[in-house]
Amino acid sequence: MTCRIVVLASGNGSLFNALIDARDDELSIEALVTDNPKAGAVAIASRAGIDVRVVDPANFADRSEWDEALTAAIEEFTPVLVVSAGFMLVLGAETLAAFPDRIINTHPALLPAFPGAHAVRDALSAGVAETGSTVHVVDAGVDTGPVIVQEAVDILPDDDESTLHERIKVVERRLLVDVVRRIARHGLAVNDRKVTLP
Ligand code: GAR
């Protein structure tokens, strides 16, 4: 059976593009939902013939109205799985309640180290020898949800934020596509913060 997926993305969309490339009988990308009308991901979706919904916080009176509109935009496509792939805003209570344990996120660090919007810069500033990629289930915190899979990436002596981030994204794209495919085939069970992914 085909797994209906809605992708959330705010930026360039290279992770979104990897999911598009992975489409087949098992994986169907139903829509891109973004907060950012200028996101590169919007152009990628248009080229691929994928529906786009823009839910820009600037157009809403407060966070709760934005949360409600974002939830409605996702629900329109009745997804089995919601994939946050470079979505830079924290999801609200209504969105989380609508898709319990069905929203996953990819983050460019080995969580719980370096959560938040500047994970790559923070890892470089901390002087650690390695960082990496984490795919996790989204909960109400900032990058605090149960971890599905992680992989380390070495930090090289002459790395800057851009070179390091690009190497992490190579790993992220592979891990994300693999996790999404496994969820499409077998589902995802979360018990007591422990994730079971066959
Ligand atoms: C990825 O590294 C993703 O993990 C990160 O944004 C990048 C998106 O890349 N997300 C976060 O930092 C969320 N806190 P892309 O626009 O090339 O797909």
Image (cartoon, helix red, strand yellow):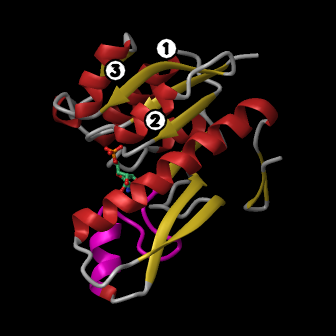
Residue 153 lies, with reference to residue 9, above or below; the image says: below
Amino acid type at image mark 2? Ala
Q: In terms of image quadrants, where is residue 179?
A: top right
What residue is drawn where x is 47% and y is 26%? 20
Callout 2: few (<14), some (14-19), or many (20+) C-alpha neighbours within 10 Å?
some
* Left or right relative to 164: residue 129: right
Structural distance between the alpha carbons of marks 3 and 1: 17 Å
* Magenta segment: 107-125
Disc sitting over residue 45 in the figure:
3
N-term mark: 2 or 3: 2
Farthest residue to the top: give it: 49
What residue is drawn where x is 58% and y is 50%? 175
Residue 41 picture location, percent across and down: 29, 31
Q: Of the residues tagged 3 and 1, which is closer to the observer?
A: 3
Task: Name the residue tied to disc 1.
Answer: 76
Residues tagged 2 and 3 counted as in contact (Cβ below 8 A)? no
Total marks drawn?
3
What residue is drawn where x is 24% and y is 23%? 43
Task: Name the residue tied to disc 2.
Answer: 18
